[in-house]
Image: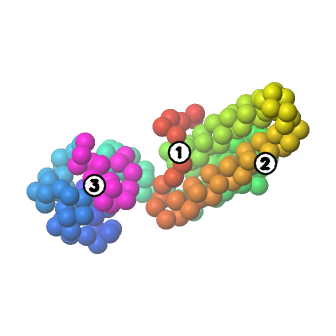
Amino acid sequence: MNKLTTYREKLNLTQDELAEKSGLSVRTIQRIEAGASPKGHSLNALAKALEIPREQLTETENDAETETKIDYKLVKLINLSSLPFVIVPLANIAVPLLIMYGKKEVNTLTKQIVSVQIIWTILSAVIFLLSPFIGKLISFQNKLVLLVLIVSVLINISIILLNTISLDKKNHLRIKLNFSFL
């Protein structure tokens, strides 16, 4: 079965209803469901109407098969495993990695979860290391370092929780990168 058909039927939409919701013609929907690849405006309109990322309509059949085999409960656990370690540099990366490889749940979602933690750890470290120098310039030295640390931890907690909520509701990450470190 075609990916568009699968997503459309999951939402209990007819071709006419999807055409109306997306602003595309019924004939366009039929062509795509018959095997044509959606591109440009059609791809964007369908993804928006179905409330899914564009990539889910363009991935190959092998990717779609892998996508259906993802254990989303385990992916949420991998994401949440960073939470207790947000103040311990590198543990927020190592723990999800260990679970990911230990449970053999290596896929694009888990790679993105770890990649987001890697980039956030690097960014937080750089900002934290620069904060004493910036604090000296604005006569706010001691308080700025502590403030940067607190804000950094709170932002990381927010990223983890937003991604968990998105995984729970839509089976994809809300905050992700366009690349992966893994």
Q: Which residue lies furthest to the bottom in this view?
A: 12
- Calculate the distance from the C-alpha at mark 1 to the C-alpha at mark 2: 22 Å
By secondary structure, the bulk of the magenta-drawn segment is best described as helix
Closer to the camera: disc 1 or disc 2? Answer: 2
Q: Earlier in the sequence, mark 3 or mark 2?
A: 3
93 in the magenta segment? no
- Calculate the distance from the C-alpha at mark 3 to the C-alpha at mark 2: 40 Å
Residue drawn at 25 percent across, 42 percent down = 40
Q: In this view, does 85 lie above or below 7?
A: above
In the image, which residues are magenta? 40-55
Direction from residue 93 to residue 11 in the image, left or right: left
**How far from the left and from the top, in percent, is residue 105?**
57, 50
**How far from the left and from the top, in percent, is residue 42?**
23, 49
Direction from residue 152 to residue 55 in the image, left or right: left
Q: Name the residue under label 2.
A: 150
The residue lying toward the viewer, choosing from 177 and 75, is 177
The residue lying toward the viewer, choosing from 100 and 18, is 18
Location of the C terminus by quadrant is top right
Circles 3 and 2: CB atoms closer than 8 Å: no
Q: Name the residue under label 3.
A: 46
Q: Mark 1 points at which residue?
A: 176
Location of residue 180 (image quadrant) = top right
Structural crowding at the residue carrying mark 3, measured as other residues with C-alpha within 10 Å and reported as few (<14), some (14–19) or many (≥20): many
- Calculate the distance from the C-alpha at mark 3 to the C-alpha at mark 1: 21 Å
Residue 120 in view here: yes
Tag 1 secondary structure: loop
Location of residue 140 (image quadrant) = top right
**How far from the left and from the top, in percent, is residue 37?**
22, 45
Tag 2 secondary structure: helix
Residue drawn at 16 percent across, 67 percent down = 16
Structural crowding at the residue carrying mark 2, measured as other residues with C-alpha within 10 Å and reported as few (<14), some (14–19) or many (≥20): few
Type of the residue with mark 3: Leu
